[in-house]
Each structure stands twice: as C-alpha cells, then as structure tokens.
Amino acid sequence: MRLAVCGKGGAGKTTISATLARVFARQGHAVTALDGDPNPNLATALGVPAELRAGLQRVPREEIVEERTDADGHTDLFLTRPFEDVLSEYGIIAPDGVGVLSMTGLLGAGRG
Ligand SMILES: Nc1ncnc2c1ncn2[C@@H]1O[C@H](COP(=O)(O)OP(=O)(O)OP(=O)(O)O)[C@@H](O)[C@H]1O
Ligand SMILES: [Mg+2]
C-alpha cells in the first residue's frame, strides 16, 4: 500500500504521517516513510535522535529513477537500483523499524 499525506501548512501532515508509519510498523508491516518536505522534519516526528538524523541524505532522484517505455509504448518510472540499496545508502531506520528517506531538501541559495 502507498499512502500520501498532503494538506495546507501546519495542518498536521508530518504528525499524522509519523504516527501512521509507526502504528503500521508495530502491526508488522514493512514501512518506509518518504519525506517530501523541502524543510524535512519527518525523522524528528518519528522519534529519531539528532545524531542518527545526521545520517539522512537527500535521495538523488535523478540518479535512482529512470523512464522506460515497454513494447506497448507505455512509459513509466523505474528504480535503477534495488530499493533496499537506496534505503541503506541514503536512509536511516527510525524507532519501530520504520525506514526513512528524504526526497527533497534545500538545494542551495535561491533554488527553492
Ligand atoms: N491532532 C493534533 N492536535 C493538536 N495539535 C496537533 C495535531 N497534529 C499536529 N499538531 C501540532 O500542530 C503543529 C503542526 O503539525 P505538523 O508539523 O504535523 O503539520 P504539517 O502539516 O506537517 O506542517 P508543515 O506544513 O509546516 O509541514 C505541530 O506543533 C503539531 O504538534
Ligand atoms: Mg510537515
């Protein structure tokens, strides 16, 4: 199952996302939480201590995703590497075993 949480600023997106991630993980599901906020704080909400959060690197989407077209002409996006490799290289493991990846972040001055 893939679950996306969106809404207006300050509505509680990060809090509800972190809570759902940990509840599902405690129920035995394999959970990876993807932070799409340019000012990422999902790992904090998941309860990851500061020294571990330092290991979270922005995933270089352009390097791990490529567009492919099948014989029927359908185009889709695919990972270029196994997902587990991406998680171990760029991500961290939060309490209850929730994997965390940061998909965005501040890219530099004046770049959003
Ligand atoms: N159900 C709730 N009841 C009361 N306070 C809440 C609830 N959910 C979140 N909050 C509080 O509201 C504030 C904003 O929550 P949160 O950071 O989760 O929102 P957000 O939508 O992710 O914000 P942003 O748009 O800045 O990313 C926080 O201080 C959080 O503790
Ligand atoms: Mg948020």
Image (spheres, helix red, strand yellow):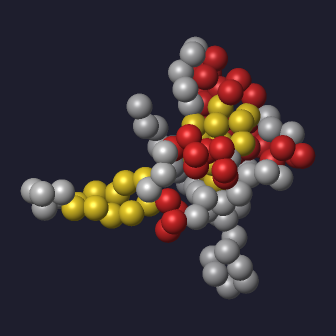
Q: 6 and 31: which one is in front? A: 31
Q: Residue furthest right?
A: 51
Q: Residue furthest top?
A: 27
Q: Residue at x 57, y 16 (%)?
A: 28
Quadrant assignment, res 23? top right
On the picture, is 86 further left or further right than 50?
Answer: left
On the picture, is 59 further left or further right than 3?
Answer: right
Horizontal and vertical percent for residue 90? Answer: 67, 52
Q: Quadrant of the C terminus?
A: bottom right
Q: Is residue 83 above or below residue 71?
A: above
Residue 80 seen in the figure? yes
Horizontal and vertical percent for residue 97? Answer: 68, 27
Q: Residue at x 34, y 57 (%)?
A: 77
Q: Quadrant of the N terminus?
A: top left
Horizontal and vertical percent for residue 62? Answer: 50, 68
Quadrant assignment, res 76? bottom left
